[in-house]
Image (cartoon, helix red, strand yellow):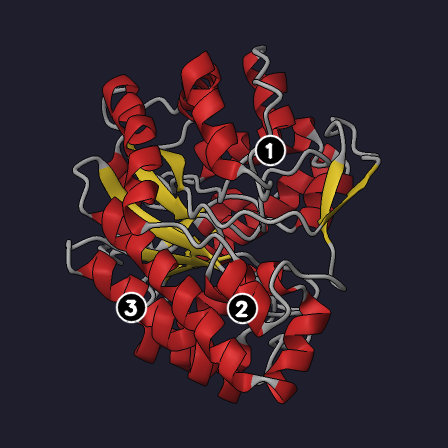
Amino acid sequence: MNSMSGPDFDRLSRVLFLDGEPDRVPFYEHFADREVMEALTGEPLSRANLKGKADLKRRLREAMKSGAMEHDLRVTIRFYSKMGYDYVPLVVPSLLSRDNLLLAEDTAELPHPKRVWQDQNRGVIESREDFERYPWPDLDEIQEFYMPQYEFVRRNLPKGMMVIAETSGGVLENVMWLMGAVPFFIALHRDPLLVEEMFTKVGTIVSHCCALAAELEMVGAVVMGDDMGYKTGPMISPEKLRRYVFPWQKRGVENVHKEGKPFILHSCGNLRLVMEDLIEYVGIDAKHSYEETSYPVTEYKRLYGHRIAILGGVDMDRISRLPELELRGYVKEIIRGCAPGGGYALGCGNTVANYVKIENYLAMLEVGRKYGRYPVRPSNLYG
């Protein structure tokens, strides 16, 4: 599965810094679902799902004490190395626990034991009293839980690979997760002071996570996942994004840039209305997450590829449902539209989700290895 040239983070770094064409188009994913990693490594991961759970600190300590965390990190490293990536993603835990979650049966080919959904109608913080009672984490605690994971990955990284640190959600995401979408939208109008204080608390924590990770030697880039839009536009008005969200994202970017490293924004949704804000004010170096029907990757490459790196973009619906031969042709089209000149990494439009066809995921990587070598010859991508 490995690229013939082996892992080399400089390949991806050149993309992120818009530093011309590397030897080949690198691969980039926000993350791969545990079921995909299990299927392609042949190794089971621990059953402890830490995402969004209450008592998160206790669960993290249990996973560290039992060895489950080191086992899962070892499998994660093996997966990204085997598939031909130049990095391993590692989440910086924000420790923002919540229990306003819903469970449902998973119908994917490689199903989760249960699919977890955000309860949009209920938050753990809906009032001033909730805000005061909430167990906000001490910033030193974040370092306490992150450093053992980072040190283990650093010691076990294959030669040529580095870490891409990922914040545990973003600024808008964490506020909306904690408050619940409906209470959040109501509070925007009825209690803007509470909303302001929520963003201050969450923004301080998320930007601290960026700073903590960026200071570390083997971290080559930092990514913030902060979904801000729908197919048609942003979730909240550009004015409110500029007031509440972008200043804290900007602080995270500045903390990363201070260490001379690039900042990647993963955000679902059609953000055309605020792309200038994200590039010029927030200062992002790269954008990830695209959808063919409303904000295709080739269009974003054409419009913004001379200013920021464009990552991923193989549409989730297509990689999940197209016959393999058609999928291969579609991936060639993306390489033809995005690869020339550099500044592009190939990958899924969102994540390697457990409903993605494994054969299509592998075909995407194979097409990338075969046709993504520079100089990319468009004529080779037809037929």
Callout 1 amino acid: Asp
Front label number (3 vs 2)? 3
List x then y, in percent, for residue 381.
53, 45
Give the numbered dot on residue 261: none
Q: Quadrant of residue 157?
A: top left
Q: Indicate the quadrant containing the C terminus: top left, top right, bottom left or bottom right.
A: top right
Callout 3 amino acid: Arg
Callout 2 amino acid: Glu
Q: Quadrant of residue 159?
A: top left
Visible residue check, residue 306: no
Could you give the CA–CA distance between mark 3 and mark 2, rounded to whole angstroms? 28 Å
- 75 left or right of 204? right
| Mark 3 / mark 2, whichever is N-terminal | 3
Name the residue beneath numbered marker 2.
299
Name the residue beneath numbered marker 3.
251
- Residue ID at (35%, 22%): 4
Name the residue beneath numbered marker 1.
33
List x then y, in percent, for residue 270.
60, 71
